[in-house]
Image: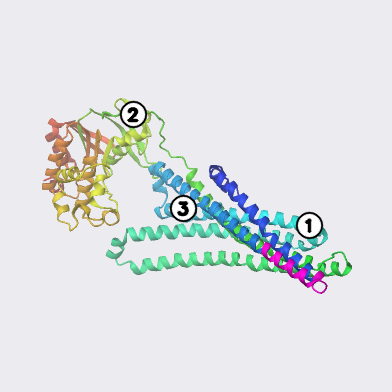
Amino acid sequence: MKELKYLNKYFVKYKYRFILGLIFTILAQIFSLYTPEYIGKSINSIQDYAKTNPELAREELLNNILIILATTIIAGLLTFLMRQTLIVMSRHIEFDLKNEVFKHYERLSQSFYKKNRTGDLMNRISEDVSKVRMYVGPAVMYSSNTIIRFGVVIIYMYNISPKLTLYSLLPLPLLSYSVFKISSQIHKKSSLYQQNLSTLSSFAQEFFSGIRVIKAYALENKKSEEFGELTQDSKDKNLSLAKTNSLFGPLMILLIGLSNLVVIYVGGMMYINGSIENIGTIAQFILYINMLTWPVASLGWVSSMIQEAEASQKRLNEFLNTEPEIQNLVPEKSVIQGKISFKNVSFTYEDTNIQGLKDISFELEKGKTLAILGKTGSGKSTILTLISRLYDPTKGEVLIDDTPIKNINLNDLRDSIAVVPQDAFLFSDSIKNNIKFGKEDATDEEIMEVAKKAAVHENIINFSQGYDTILGERGITLSGGQKQRVSIARAFIKESPILLLDDCLSAVDTETEEQILSNLLQLTQQKTTIIVSHRVSSAKNADKIIILEEGQIIQQGSHNQLIEIEGYYKELYNKQLLEKEIY
């Protein structure tokens, strides 16, 4: 239960709903006790007056029936209000918990997402949170209902006959032991099932995302077999869990049946011996015992829900207790101008132990453009991730406006940067909304203007729905070059002092590249811009150029030294291949 202590803060938050639900539960149980009491009185009236005074017996029967009817209706209404209060509370907690998990996902660092699979993350925020809701809703409701009913019923039974009460409750210790043993098995099997479900979700997510590759390599049958093995394993674990759960119902009914037999025998003997004066008392006790049937039977279901919720909350806590490596250390608002400085910066990727940068130093003034050239794996993109503070440098210091980047409000820093990633990511939404992602209040005219500057406007208007065209997952509707240009338009529309372009022209032809670079020159007059590319042609408008090799700066210079750098670049790599890419 220690994992579920995390949820106590939500019970405190919704304490008034919780307390009101408990009040409704207590009142519902009190009114439900009138039924066995007045049934017992009715049987006693029949026994006492059926032959001597039939009219009085009839009158008492009618009065008792009316009382039973009225109290049953009131108990039903209070039970309805109990469910409306406690179950609705659980939905509020589910809403809050899903939002908490999602916001925590947003805070977690880049390295976290390299270590965890998307399907597992999705499963925890959906399936695991749903299991937890069953604990804070139905499990809490039925547990409180059971405890209160047991307390009230046993007090009534004890007041009538302590001896008969004691005998009728003899099977309960056996019940408690059975619940404990079965619950421990449910906890183990539930944990295994949830882990398998995460694996299944991850496999399905990767399958759907990579469906084009799977079809291209004709791997459908192989993947179907792999999926079949996973689903078979999932079915086996779920069936094993279901079999264990199925023991509860029959066991509870058996124990309640034993209690009824005890009441009939012991109560009958006590009536014969004169310890009980009225036969109606035995009937009353049987009804009381049967009133405990559902609460006792629900113990198994509730126990199962609690065990499953604990297993799920444990998986959630693993993430919720994970602190992001990148912390926002400055709560005060920061104003970014755009100057960028690297001072002896080195960076090593923790997960692979690969050194991405080695002793990098440069300075880029506000409003200037820097081009970073180099072959794949030379560390170009790593520089951009450090500027966005997706990672912190292993050694050295990154400064923005001569202020260490850790001393800048993280939200303001990232809000001041427009990024075009190397792998253009578009959402499953309209083209218009994908571009507006950079500026939510952008007008249609602004959207069209930046689309023209990104050389994608003509492509968009040729679609049947134009800018309202809905894209498939990750922008699959568009070609690689079109995705890159929509991503560029999204960055262009964002009013930010820093613009980072990460090899975002690799999928466009040289003519389109020339057009975009020409428009970029006009747009970035007041922006600090960094262009990462393996093409020298992308750097021709840059004020400063850096060439990287294995994480080190091997050549740098100004715009005027472009020809010399280009010659060095060609000499460093395969000249014929490079010329095809550049010209």
Q: Position of residue 237 (x, y in %)?
A: 53, 64
Is the Cβ of the residue at disc 2 closer than 8 Å to that at disc 3? no
Pick the residue in front: 482 or 221: 482
Secondary structure beneath dot 2 equals loop
Rounded to the nearest angstrom, the CA distance separating label 2 from label 1 is 70 Å
Pick the residue in front: 62 or 513: 62
- On residue 334, the disc is 2
When the figure is inspected, residue 232 is found, relative to residue 469, above or below; the finding is below
Q: Does residue 491 appear in the picture of this structure? A: yes
Please give left or right for residue 448 compared with residue 195 in the image. Answer: left
Mark 1 lies on residue: 158
Instruction: Assess disc 1: are there few (<14), some (14-19) or many (≥20) residues with their C-alpha within 10 Å of its C-alpha.
Output: few
Rounded to the nearest angstrom, the CA distance separating label 3 from label 1 is 47 Å
Q: Which residues are magenta?
A: 47-67
Pick the residue in front: 60 or 545: 60
Q: Earlier in the sequence, mark 2 or mark 3?
A: 3
Mark 3 lies on residue: 124
Q: Residue at x 13, y 51 (%)?
A: 458
Secondary structure beneath dot 1 equals helix
